Image (cartoon, rainbow, N blue to C red):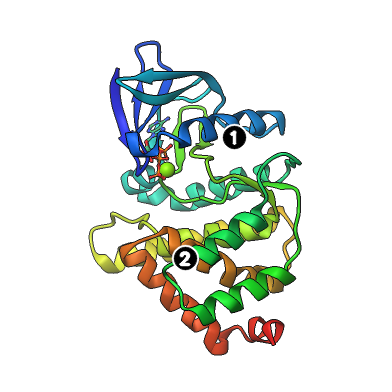
Amino acid sequence: MRKIGEGDKSEVFVLPDGRILKLFFGHYAELAPVEAEMSTMLVRASVDAPSVDECVEVDGRPGIVFGNLHEGITLSSDVRKRPWGIIHAAQSLARLHASVHECSSEELPSQRERLASEIESSDAISNETRDLAMRVLADLPDGTTVCHNDIHMLNVIVHESGATLIDWVLATRGNPTADLAGAILQLRFGEKPGGLVAGFAMEAGRAAFWRLYLRQYLSLRPVSREELLRWQLPVAAALAGRRAGRMRAQLQEHISHLQKGRHRHILEIAR
Ligand SMILES: Nc1ncnc2c1ncn2[C@@H]1O[C@H](COP(=O)(O)OP(=O)(O)OP(=O)(O)O)[C@@H](O)[C@H]1O
Ligand SMILES: [Mg+2]
């Protein structure tokens, strides 16, 4: 088998028969059955997500062999290789994400419960921010829409027959606007889509990408702008706890802007 990628939790290989194997690192072994079960629920919800062909063990590490996942390249590599394709790439991601939000599930874990527990345990925020984020979250509406909750450029695989969202381990049922808010934060503050030589061009590429993505998403699905802004604080507070380094620092700065009333309605709700 040939290694084609690596994430925080796993290494990814292509098997001689062309199927994709995600082999978890030992310290994330318990996530293999979680991701496998998640995939099964997503298939039941008619989501176009990688489906589990078989669960295997290689050198004592658990793995999932996906049946309908093709070898491709990440959206990040795609945009680096073909920066002129940025508009098409951002619009494709928005279409893909919006199509996920057409699906619903009663059996996926609850987004609200996940966010609440991530905010409670986040070591990236102050207690004041934690309380505010929890109060804002309590006022926001729930849902049963399928949400990926970890949309970023390394979790999208571009291949011959289109693009596929991978890494569904954080999927929930919930409110699609929360998922949209999370995607915007990750595209805005996460890995750069650039590779466009100079730092300035890279920043510009990233700023363009999330705006193009958002504009396209809004053209496909109705979203309350107010609600999208309100989701930012709880989602950013939860995400900051999951991220490290530069991205965590940028999220902390963003959270502090939100709290300073740049988005007045968040403070109004919390009063
Ligand atoms: N079908 C594929 N074709 C090419 N590369 C792939 C494919 N599937 C996964 N990869 C590569 O493997 C990486 C890790 O996959 P995945 O996101 O599922 O693992 P993870 O360990 O859960 O990631 P994370 O770092 O987000 O925790 C991807 O970011 C990508 O670079
Ligand atoms: Mg990943």
**Is 57 located above or below residue 259 in the figure?**
above
Residue pictured at 72% horizontal, 39% vertical: 107
Determine whether the residue tagged by mark 1 lies in a helix, strand or loop. helix
In the picture, residue 36 is in which quadrant? top right
**Is 139 located above or below residue 264 in the figure?**
above
**Is 96 located above or below residue 36 in the figure?**
below
Residue pictured at 68% horizontal, 54% vertical: 176
Q: Nearer the viewer, residue 13 or 56?
A: 56
Placement of the N terminus among the 4 image quadrants:
top left
Which amino acid type is marked by label 2? Ser
Mark in the foreground, 1 or 2: 2
Cα separation, mark 1 vs mark 2, equals: 24 Å
**Is 130 located above or below residue 211 in the figure?**
below
What x and y, as percent, mark residue 29? 40, 33
What x and y, as percent, mark residue 172? 64, 46
Residue 94, can we see it?
yes
Residue pictured at 76% horizontal, 63% vertical: 141
Q: Nearer the viewer, residue 121 or 125?
A: 121
Determine whether the residue tagged by mark 2 lies in a helix, strand or loop. loop
Q: Residue most toward the top?
A: 17
Tell me the number on the disc at residue 122: 2
Q: Which residue is mark 1?
A: 38
